[in-house]
Amino acid sequence: MTDHITLKLFASLKAFTPANPDRFPIAPGTTVGDLIESLGVPAEEVKLVFVNGVKQERTVPLKAGDRVGIFPAVGGG
Amino acid sequence: MPETLAADVVRLAEPSSHPDGEPFRALSVKNVQALAERYRIPGRDVEITALKSNILPQRYSRNMKAFSLRQQAELLGSSVTVVGLGGLGGTVAELLARTGVGTLHVVDGDRFEESNLNRQALCTEETLEMTKVSAAVNRIRAINSSIVVSPHETYLTEETGPSIIGDSLAVVDCLGGVTERFMLEKAAKQAARPLISAAMAGLSGHVTTIFPEDRGLELIYGNPRDLPSDGAEAVLGCPPQTMNILASCQCSEVVKVLLKQENVLRNRMLALDLEDYTFEIVSLYP
């Protein structure tokens, strides 16, 4: 059985948004770090990941229904 | 003298009313300026005296009821430092002047150039080549002559930061680039003042408030040693609509901090993206 999550990539990382960000399939046990890798986002460009509105580290496993946001460094002002 | 000023304020107050019909006693801009001149004090102090007698300077009448008279007086008695007078800072300085924050320290060592015209509120064809600080001083005085403006035509550094910040109750991070922000955060922490920080690239951005004991920017950017000096804005640019909404959120935070109100974005961050209208509050502690 495949789980689905919701994905939101910000700023320059938008280019890595998959075709189905509102219903993105993940294998059970997929971590935040696995997700970043599977999207093809260069790991060093990811500065902040939040899951269901809370900052999380790369080792955290994802579960069905999670909302994941990913931010690069932005400094414009 | 103070009794005389208070008596003059009461004498010059005029009846007025809010749009809902509620009456109030008002002091006009002209009378604030006249009393400031007569007593050789900043207009801000005339306005504080008026507010203490339940007289509302007309220029702040539409700030009610977002603020009470007491809160308006508190804002007029407060000092804020705005660091960087570009896209964020120009709008922040203008909004704080209109809000009626009584003392504004404005800090920037730069001059305007043509690429600033798309987003920097203080940059016009007329102010090109001018220093950002002088444009800020002119704009603030043109909007609200009651405010005391303290210009610092320099780039704030870790060394000069605490003396520039001085008695400010809040510091607003309106810098461009990424790494400089960590320097400003250090300076604000040294001065034991909260820092309200915003940054953007393209249609995405974020805003947060950092108190001296908070971990702050590293929760958003990671280790500063792993950062390029510029972020994604180098590629995506800085359109004005993203800039202004973030500047507006920074002013909202300044007001909350100065008035010690709840719901400050402390250890939290508002992340937004105008492309699909994502607005999300992110808790920065897992």
Image (cartoon, rainbow, N blue to C red):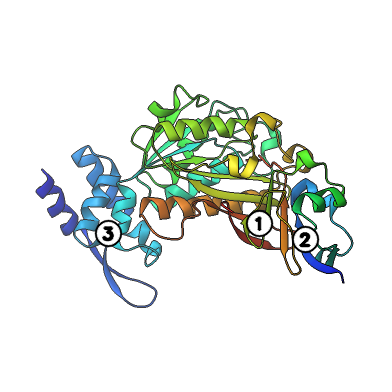
Residue B27 seen from this side: no
Q: Which residue is drawn at 77% across and 65% down?
A: A6
**Eyeballing the image, is A34 above or below B225?**
below
Badge 2 marks a residue whose secondary structure is strand
Residue under pointer 3: B70
- Residue furthest out toward the top: B159
User: How many numbered badges does the structure rendering display?
Assistant: 3
Q: How far apart are marks 3 and 2 (CA)?
A: 45 Å
Q: Tell me, yes or no, whether the two marked residues, 1 and 3, touch with CB atoms within 8 Å.
A: no
Q: Which residue is drawn at 34% across and 51% down?
A: B75
**Quadrant location of the N terminus of chain B in the rendered image:** top left
**Eyeballing the image, is B21 above or below B229?**
below
Q: Which of B225 and B27 is in front in this view?
A: B225
Residue under pointer 2: A7
Badge 1 marks a residue whose secondary structure is strand
Q: Which of B255 and B63 is in front in this view?
A: B255
Residue under pointer 1: B272
- Give the letter of the chain under mark 1: B
- Residue furthest out toward the front: A29
Q: What residue type is labelled 1?
A: Leu
Q: Residues within 10 Å of mark 2 (few under 14, many from 20)?
A: some
* Camera-nearest label, 1 or 3: 1
